[in-house]
Image: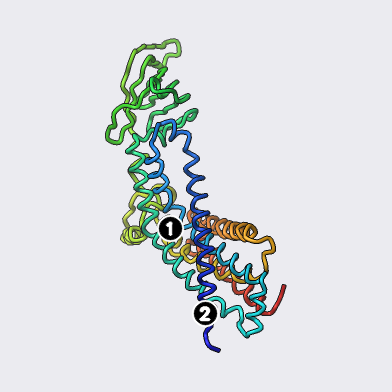
Amino acid sequence: MVAPTILWRYILRDVLVHTSLGLALFSLVLVVQNVLRSLEELLAADLSAGILLQLAALVLPSFMSYAIPTSLLFGVLITFGRMSADGEVVAMRASGISVPRLLPPVVALGVVCAAVTGYLLFELEPASRQRMKTFTRELSASVRLIKTGHFLSIGNRTLYVAERGDETCPLRGVLIGDFTTDRTVYISAECATIGPEEEWNLALDLERGSIHFSDTDPERYRRVGFGSMHVSLDISAYLTGAKRGRDFTLAELFALKRRFARGEDPEIRGGNGERTVDTQIHRRLAFPLAPLLLGVLAVPLGIRPLRSGRSAGAITAVAVMGLYWIVFTTGELVAERGWLPPWLGIWTANAIAAALAVYLIRATMRGES
């Protein structure tokens, strides 16, 4: 039978439209949700709308790799659900067009989405994470690091801020504990202002406070009051130092793997370094296949009509992607902890998705409900 190119173009165009709508929706939700977590502190720091947009742009690449598979899944479900509900799938079957012959446009779009997702994971996500650190430093690190009502450990010091104030007193109720020596020192101040930017330091200008000195003798205690005082806290550990696994590009991960093979031990934050590198390499190679596998899986799911329309398609897409992501992240977690080999932990989600897609396509071909 001649390839149904007209039909393929029809399916490709419809899937592409719905995928684009889903991508805009899911990207917006993911970015807004994560920006809103820090919105109160960002606004309290009097940041402009331009700075907020920069923050959203830096966050976007980290979530696009998750939005793309979900969007393709959504687009395929909507397209084939509508075609099935309108009787188009029955008409195609009557014309001798089987389910596998409907897959080429979905596979083609899945390959494109897989390539884009791979590029995001290989290059853009690590670069975005590094730019986010630089962006944090350019904001004097105060917006992201200083959280009112929380204790922040900075090396051998601890910082606590009760609340944010106004322009005359930006930070109220400041307490700093210094544990760098045998004699613990506590500094308290009514107000604090973030001073001029210092290299890898958070500068605080304290006002109306006191310094409390402890002593090995419990009966001895010394307190010194002050009108103003300048303190610098080293926050370089938050901005530089050893990277985490997701901060490396794919090329850097392979370079680290070669270093481990030579017996070197480069510093990597979090867990066993070599195991973390292996896990991240498999993660970068496995997850880009999610759009292709989930897109194919969505074809038999969509052919079984979604009576409730687009809302049901969106819910189904989120549910399927959620299940896939749970299996994938669980596999990544157990791989990083050494409970399973990295290849087995990471690729399990893809294997399940592929097996389920094959089963549902064969079941649909047999006319099973």
Closest to the observer, 32 or 336:
32
Comparing marks 2 and 1, which lies closer to the viewer? 2
Q: Residue furthest bottom?
A: 1
Q: Report x, y in % for residue 261.
A: 34, 61
The answer to whether residue 289 is left or right of residue 134 is right
> Tag 1 or tag 2, which sits nearer the N-term?
2
Q: Residue furthest right?
A: 369
Q: CA distance from mark 2 to mark 1?
A: 41 Å
- Identify the element where label 1 is drawn: helix
Residue at the spot 47% in from the left edge and 38% down from the top edge: 38
Near mark 1 (Cα within 10 A), the count class, few <14, some 14-19 or many ≥20, is many
Q: How is the image coloured?
A: rainbow
Residue at the spot 49% in from the left edge and 50% down from the top edge: 28
Residue ID for mark 1: 280
Q: Report x, y in % for residue 216.
A: 41, 17
From the image, which quarter does the N terminus lie in?
bottom right
Residue ID for mark 2: 6
Near mark 2 (Cα within 10 A), the count class, few <14, some 14-19 or many ≥20, is few
The amino acid sitting under disc 2 is Ile
The answer to whether residue 188 is left or right of residue 354 is left
Closest to the observer, 52 or 241:
52
Q: Report x, y in % for residue 116.
A: 42, 63
The amino acid sitting under disc 1 is Gln
Q: Quadrant location of residue 80?
A: bottom right
Q: Residue furthest left?
A: 199
Q: Report x, y in % for residue 303.
A: 64, 71
- Identify the element where label 2 is drawn: helix
